[in-house]
Amino acid sequence: MVSDLLIKVLDRGKNAEYYGGDQGWFETKTAKDYGCGVIALANVIITHERMTDRKNPGILKVEKSRYMQVAEALRKKYLPIIPKLGISGIELAIGANAYFFKNGLNVTARWGVKPNNLWKSVDRMLKNNWPVILAIGPNNTLIGKKSLELMGAESNSTARAHYVTITAADEESITVSSWGSKYVILKEDYEAYMKKTSNPLFSNILYIK
């Protein structure tokens, strides 16, 4: 089991704590509808920065206002959102690498790994203090509307054409952040979705090393 690795976002005005960010916090409709990739990268960057902060190592909490400063900066400078399309995996990798270069981080990102290396790659990133951006890709057919089940403590959800953030993994499942909440996805369910409903080009991870 790779332990839980994600920033908790505090909204003191509502006395609430969220499990990572929520694209619904953006102000524009396009970002609210298609900003999941930006939120996923904000989760990754802020969590890794806090995990490697020498002054306050491992303190995984951030104010919502600060979180959104980072998310908005990513959206404006590195990850422009295409209306009705969002951000592709390749665009996500390009934006992440631009951010890493600009901020002096000696890492690189690439979109996608071989399906048989997927979970090993996830474990490797988590052990190196990097949450993992996972795409639940679109259906293979234009009219396809099948979704992947996300199991929550209070209620379940479904997703397709959506980025989530992997925060923990064990032999059978992964824990993810989506819309500021915690969910569990069974690995066998994701593998079946990737191979039968979507494909590994669109349903994959952003690998950082």
Image (cartoon, grey):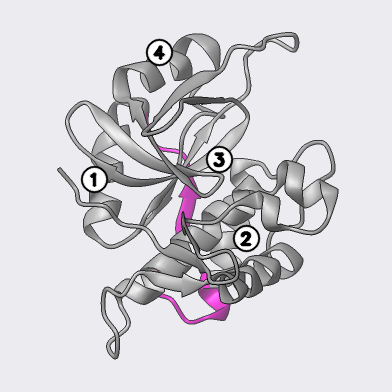
Which mark is on residue 123?
A: 1
Foreground label between 2 and 1: 1
Q: Is residue 105 magenta?
A: yes
From the viewer's side, name the closer residue of 15 and 163. 15
Asked if the residues shown at circle 4 and circle 3 are in contact, with their CB atoms under 8 angstroms apart, the answer is: no
Q: Which residues are magenta?
A: 100-114
Which mark is on residue 95?
A: 2
Residue at x-position 46% and y-position 73%: 62
Measured in 3D between alpha carbons, the distance from the residue under mark 2 to the one under mark 1, in whole angstroms, is 23 Å
Label 3 is placed on what type of residue? Tyr
From the viewer's side, name the closer residue of 42 and 118. 42
Residue that numbered label 3 is attached to: 163
Residue that numbered label 4 is attached to: 192
Label 2 is placed on what type of residue? Gly
Q: Residues within 10 Å of mark 2 (few under 14, many from 20)?
A: many
Foreground label between 3 and 1: 3
Could you say where residue 136 lies in the image, as x and y percent from the top left?
53, 29
